[in-house]
Image (spheres, rainbow, N blue to C red):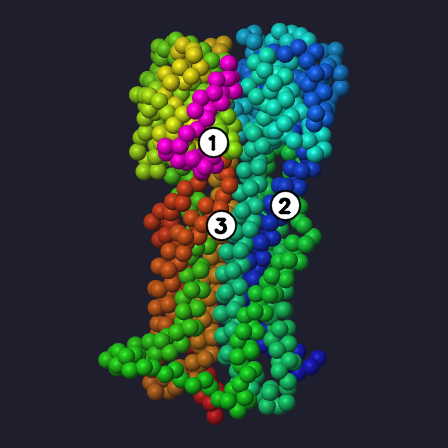
Amino acid sequence: MSVLDRKVLRDIWRFRGQVFTIVLLVGAGVTVLVGSVSTYASLLTTQETYYRESRFADLWADVKRAPKAVLGKLSEIPGISVIEARIVKDLRVEWPQSELSVAGRIVSIPHLGEPVINKLALKSGRWLDPLRLDEILVNTAFAEAWSVRAGDPIDVILNGRIQRFTIVGTATSPEFVYAHRPGNPLPDDRTFVVLWAGEQALANAFDMVGAFNSIAVTLAPRALAPAVIADLDRALEPYGAPGAFERRDQPSHRFLSDELAEQRTLAITVPLVFFGIAAFLLNVVLGRLIEAQREQIAALKALGYPSLPIALHYAKFVTLVCAVGSLTGVLVGVRYGQGMMSNYRPFFRFPELSYVLPGWLPVAAVLASLAAGLAGVLTSLRRVLRLKPAVAMRPPAPPSFNRFWASSLAELKPAAKMVLRGMLGRPLRTGLTVVGLACAVPMVVLGLFWWDALAHMVTVQFDGIERGDATVTFSDPVSSRAVREIGHIPGVLAVEGQRVLPVRLRAGYRTYRSSLTGLATDGELRVPRNEDLEAIRPPPEGLMISRGLADRLGVRVGSLLTIEVLEGERPIRTVLVTALVDEILGFSAYMELSAVSRLMREQDLVSLALVRVDPAHEREVWSRISERPKVVAISVKKTWLRVFEEKIAAMVLISAVVLTTFGVIIAVGVVYNSARIALQERAWELASLRILGFSRAEASRLLFAELAIEMLIAIPLGLFLAQGIVELLLQARDNETFTIPAVISAATFASASLIVSTAGLLSAWSVRRRIDRLDLVAVLKTRD
């Protein structure tokens, strides 16, 4: 082993405290990179594999009722590879175990064999017996939520009549990877069920013998979806088709795509932000370490060592440190990614949601950490190697001050003067330390602000906009008399009807498939609001749309927007955008209720009702409403909030813990290394002060006063950076399902400041113990 190699090992042991903090910094950066990217890769790989194996459809089209004879004509449309007809209905399930009504969707299975498109993955039990019309499959999520087993009965309301089925198995489907009930954007596995029954049983129940009301289509290679959709719409128009739609508009796929897009954004931006901070801190810490060893470098050069072996010596030092940090980061990053995947399992029901670690990812993470470390060393090392040995062996010249600084410091006490001279004499080093400390604050804020954002989302959406206690969804549009009848139920305090239409909104070449909601002008149970949270009432004419939808379509207030209704006679009308509303959940469009009636040329029809009830009579009210045959689902706000907290809290918690821990690591790394290097640089001065009669506490205060001032400057700067980084990350999101506001409370800012300050104080305290143990004689001899 060469002399320089032995020096590497000695330096690592000598600076083991600093090396440990650098290892933590490198490990934190690698953890974020590996965890975020592997989570995205796992979701994407699972989605692509499952879609391919199950032959997930490319297009769908619904009709009122069409004869199977038309399938031959449809299959001849250019671009269609496989087409499969089905019967699909929304319904209600009698499930005595649940206090609330259970909504469901039932899908037919071919009489003989399995579906060719959207294949089911049987998780337990067996397949349906084609000779039995009373057998049924349920989705795995519902079965797990209620501990359903093969052989259990289930009562399903088919076309107004209760029919008992026997559950023979559980399954998953690519159409319901993300399954949620009407009116509830989050999956509630206890109150929503997906059912699969034999085609003959559903045909008998819904008068669909020899007919269908839904088709699924796969496209041929290089087929153009818009052209196929246009041909399908023309062919199905006589059968009451609302219009075919692509996979991107399928509800389950849309939510999954939103989550993948968001995870992709986070996998790019968060590691970049954190690794940028880690690289900067490595440059600061390792750069100062090299500067502190300039005399040793000069001695080696004086003994005849060329510059290259000396540079390689420090490269080996950094390589060893980064290798240990990278290995730790990869291992922790894998656990972090696995934890994130576990949190996704209640949302996305794949047959297998496996964790995938791409082979290139650990290599890329290690190379990134090495690049950051070597950049930090080479910058300072190049400056030192340029010095001549005789110059480098002397201590650096004391900083010079201009007259302004000299006169400003002249009036201060000696102790304060020493502190400020140390800071102002090396402004670049002081500035870098301040920025390094400031970088710790955004990491902590990134972990904590989610609680503020979620609390704001709940307050705005469910206290300000959705002001009812429940949403009652009807199977078909009904007369407004049904709303008045619900209002007469004892315990109902207020009720309002709404008309919801499936529409395609068009602005130039941009289109978006959404829903149009008709609101009463004086309604109080759903009140759209602007960005200042001021209530906006629907105008007699014109359209209100959410801000995110306006951005997607490229329109603003005063723009013209074309509404293509996908129901009934499918009217088309061009209207003026009169207002933009700010909503948390999804993209919305609103018109005044009577204007929707005029658009559809119908009289007082509603699709759903918003209800406010007396809390003392909730159960009786839900029971009475559930008895009505046209009611297909009741979405209770209290239940939705419970699901929201259960499913979102775990994901927020793990992110908060990880990011807060990384913020503490940054703070500890910067403060500890700054204090240790400052102690190494000023040990002679501190020992001299002790000899002159200064106490240990007085000598320590001179060293730590500089760090305290830097901390006081860094924390406000860090809070400012935190607000900017949060806004930048949220603007980079591409998610139609949830709009997360950049809301950070004073308590979060205070908590982040306290956490970073505490981490800094503990690090400084550990260095203070070294000051107390200084060997004054040995330190003073180092200048001889």
Q: Earlier in the sequence, mark 2 or mark 3?
A: 2
At horizontal 54% and vertical 16% (from top left) the residue drawn is 92
CB atoms at circles 2 and 1 under 8 Å apart? no
Residue marked by disc 3? 657
- Which type of secondary structure does the marked residue at label 3 adopt? helix
Can you see residue 776?
A: no
Residue at 50% x, 14% y: name it: 569
* Residue corresponding to mark 1: 507
Q: Residues within 10 Å of mark 2 (few under 14, many from 20)?
A: many
As drawn, is 640 to the left or to the right of 754?
right
Quadrant the N terminus occupies = bottom right
Looking at the rendered structure, the secondary structure element under dot 2 is: helix
Measured in 3D between alpha carbons, the distance from the residue under mark 2 to the one under mark 1, in whole angstroms, is 35 Å
Viewer can see residue 11: yes
Magenta stretch contains residue 602: no
Q: Magenta span covers which residues?
A: 547-574
Amino acid tagged 3: Val
Residue for badge 2: 41
Residue 539 as seen in the image, left or right of residue 218: left
Mark 2, mark 1: which one is toward the viewer? 1
Residue type highlighted by circle 2? Ala
Q: Residue at x 29, y 82 (%)?
A: 403
Q: Nearer the viewer, mark 1 or mark 3?
A: 1
Dot 2 or dot 1: first in sequence order is: 2
Query: Could you tell whether 494 is left or right of 284 in the image?
Result: left
Residue drawn at x 72%, y 26% as measured from the top left:
81
